[in-house]
Amino acid sequence: MSVVLLPRASDPDGTALARAKLAECIGDKYAAVMIVNGEGPAIDAVVEMGSARAVLDPMRRTVVWLRDKSVLAKEQRDEYAPAGAAAVFLGLQDTVVETLSAAKGAQKYWVEKAFTKAGG
């Protein structure tokens, strides 16, 4: 799996479905997870780069696109979608190990480094 697109809060059962899908991705104890936050041209570049790097090892790398932060509980928003972060990487222990800006998230070097740091 390359990119998991989370539903928006405005979608039917969007919040519940988004939380369930995110929990499923994070719960994979063998995969590092890149959570991409937001929308727009700069974020599109981050999603594309994350997908390109994840496809190299699809069993150990997952990209989750969180277009609508409001689907998360406040604690999750603070951890997985902090202000200024275009991408957050979760390691195999389900903890944040790296945060990237949109500029770094669109660059192969930084995304690959973050996936490697996360264990993927």
Image (cartoon, helix red, strand yellow):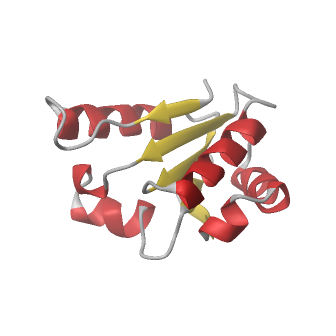
Q: Residue shown at 37%/37% (left/top)?
A: 6
Compare residues 118 and 2 and report the one nearer the observer: 2
Q: Height in image: 87 above or below 34?
A: below
Left or right, 16 with reference to 94: left
Please, which residue is most extreme toward the front here? 41
Residue 65 visible to the viewer: yes
Q: Find residue 11 and report its horizontal and vertical position in percent.
A: 19, 34
Residue 94 visible to the viewer: no
Q: Height in image: 101 above or below 93?
A: below
Compare residues 39 and 23 and report the one nearer the observer: 39
What count of labels does the image hold?
0
Q: Residue shown at 77%/41% (left/top)?
A: 53
Q: Height in image: 109 above or below 101?
A: above
Q: Split into 4 quadrants, where in the image is the N terminus?
A: top right
Compare residues 81 and 49 and report the one nearer the observer: 49
Q: Find residue 55 and report its horizontal and vertical position in percent.
A: 74, 30
**For residue 30, which quarter of the picture?**
top right
Please, which residue is most extreme toward the right here? 109
Left or right, 17 with reference to 35: left
Q: Find residue 28 and report its horizontal and vertical position in percent.
A: 53, 32
Q: Split into 4 quadrants, where in the image is the C terminus?
A: top right
Q: Residue shown at 81%/58% (left/top)?
A: 113
Q: Residue shown at 30%/37% (left/top)?
A: 18
Left or right, 91 with reference to 22: right
